[in-house]
């Protein structure tokens, strides 16, 4: 796609061939790229020869005195000619017209951006100077920051800068805050009123105190049939776990499941559980279980949510994030549980005022998390279909929606709207700008 900004001048002349037969933009000169990311694959030519693709990135050029960014350009070492794919440009909204030996290209508003004449050997070539400017670099930095804002569940740019600058996670580039307004955040997040009171004491070891709260019922049942979710937040690390419930009565079973997992991971016994006075927490069975295992169950005073402030604020933050992610991709409300799960996953990799210079993930586990694998919730994702499930002429990938992260390392949870089924896959191609 062309993105026009002001400026002129260039450092190197270059010829680009406008090709109707090329499926992608391609360039063989690495030094022309403003930014470049690794990308595997091969390019096949009409004579059956193949050349390896080693990257994909952005090339900055000067066209008609204006600077232009060409996005999604394959870096193909050894390619003798630079190629612009007319099909890729048409896919981005440009119109290409051929008339009387002339090629004209217009943008989505009908404004002509290119007009070239056919050469004597029946080719259409475009001469463009290559340009690298700090203005273009800043544009790319803003786009990268915007992408990570979405990948991190709509974390504010100040938080992103803190997270990247302090090296609390691996795989996050340096983020420069900017003033763009996120409509999804505006719709999904509401102003939070702070709880007044003195500074609270924070525990010094995992599971000395766990905060819990239940959210729901939701007016829309989730894809998995849930109407509530329950969270458990460790006071020491501020790491959070979420479980989904069809009915509130399932709270005790989820607490048992959480306790077994958390104690095994940390090697510490759960000592204190702090909750509100909801009936799911005050039942005889819940009380007997806590007494049996020596767990002190602290119940907040009636009409005093401040006494369970950690859990209350955590659920509010989770819902703000989940709402923003669902609205940001225009998904149906039935995806709320998947968005909540992703929100908790990402929140555990957020900076928090309660834990200095560490994410909750690191405070709990002792090692820095990576965010390289994060993707934009709700985007289109193509999952590879194994050989055993397809014939020779069948599609090799199936279109899904990215809805979460699987427990297995680098695996993703995908949803197929046509069949109503969720799948887990490691071999996925994402279109993070699509939904």
Image (cartoon, rainbow, N blue to C red):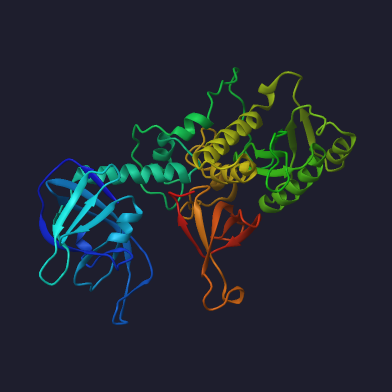
Frontmost residue, 188 versus 156 = 188
* Left or right placement of residue 430 versus residue 313 in this view: left
Q: Position of residue 283 (x, y in %)?
A: 87, 33
Q: Check the image and report above or below for 396 versus 406.
A: below
Frontmost residue, 78 versus 205 = 78
* Left or right placement of residue 358 versus residue 63 in this view: right
Residue 36 visible in rendering: no
Q: Check the image and report above or below for 163 versus 193.
A: below
Residue 424 visible in rendering: yes
Q: Check the image and report above or below for 93 versus 13.
A: above
Q: Check the image and report above or below for 2 versus 194.
A: below
Instruction: Name the residue rendered at 55%, 57% in the picture.
Output: 400
Q: Position of residue 201 (x, y in %)?
A: 62, 28
* Left or right placement of residue 429 versus residue 64 in this view: right
Q: Position of residue 223 (x, y in %)?
A: 68, 47
Frontmost residue, 137 versus 14 = 14
Q: Position of residue 269 (x, y in %)?
A: 74, 45
């Amino acid at each position: 796609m062309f993105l026009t900004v002001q400026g002129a001048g260039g450092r190197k002349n270059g010829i680009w061939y406008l090709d109707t037969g090329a499926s992608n933009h391609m360039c063989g000169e690495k030094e022309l790229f403003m930014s470049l990311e690794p990308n595997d694959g091969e390019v096949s030519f009409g004579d059956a020869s193949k050349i390896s693709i080693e990257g994909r990135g952005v090339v900055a050029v000067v066209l008609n005195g204006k600077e232009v960014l060409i996005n999604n350009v394959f870096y193909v070492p050894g390619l003798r000619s630079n190629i612009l794919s007319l099909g890729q440009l048409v896919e981005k909204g440009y119109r290409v017209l051929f008339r009387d030996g002339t090629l004209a290209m217009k943008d989505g508003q009908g404004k002509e951006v290119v007009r070239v004449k056919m050469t004597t050997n029946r080719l259409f070539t475009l001469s463009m100077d290559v340009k690298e400017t700090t203005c273009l670099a800043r544009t790319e930095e803003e786009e990268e920051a915007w992408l990570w804002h979405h990948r991190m569940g709509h974390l504010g740019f100040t938080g992103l800068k803190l997270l990247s600058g302090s090296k609390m996670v691996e795989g996050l580039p340096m983020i420069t805050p900017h003033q763009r307004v996120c409509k999804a955040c505006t719709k999904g997040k509401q102003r939070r009123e702070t709880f007044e009171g003195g500074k609270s004491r924070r525990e010094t070891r995992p599971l000395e105190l766990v905060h819990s709260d239940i959210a729901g019922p939701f007016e829309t049942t989730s894809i998995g049939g849930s109407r509530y979710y329950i969270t458990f937040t460790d006071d020491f690390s501020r790491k959070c776990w979420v479980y989904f419930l069809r009915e509130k009565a399932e709270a005790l079973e989820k607490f048992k499941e959480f306790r077994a997992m958390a104690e095994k991971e940390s090697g510490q016994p759960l000592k204190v559980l702090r909750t509100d006075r909801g009936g799911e927490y005050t039942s005889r069975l819940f009380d007997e279980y806590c007494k049996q295992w020596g767990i002190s169950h602290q119940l907040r005073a009636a009409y005093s949510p401040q006494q369970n402030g950690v859990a209350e604020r955590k659920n509010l933050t989770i819902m703000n994030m989940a709402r923003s992610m669902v609205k940001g991709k225009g998904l149906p409300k039935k995806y709320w549980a998947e968005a909540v799960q992703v929100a908790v996953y990402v929140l555990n990799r957020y900076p928090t005022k309660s834990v200095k210079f560490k994410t909750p993930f690191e405070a709990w586990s002792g090692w820095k998390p990576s965010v390289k694998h994060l993707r934009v919730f709700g985007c289109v994702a193509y999952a590879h279909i194994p050989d055993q499930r397809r014939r020779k002429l069948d599609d090799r990938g199936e279109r899904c929606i990215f809805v979460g992260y699987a427990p297995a390392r680098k695996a993703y949870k995908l949803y197929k709207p046509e069949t109503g089924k969720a799948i887990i896959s490691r071999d996925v191609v994402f279109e993070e700008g699509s939904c």
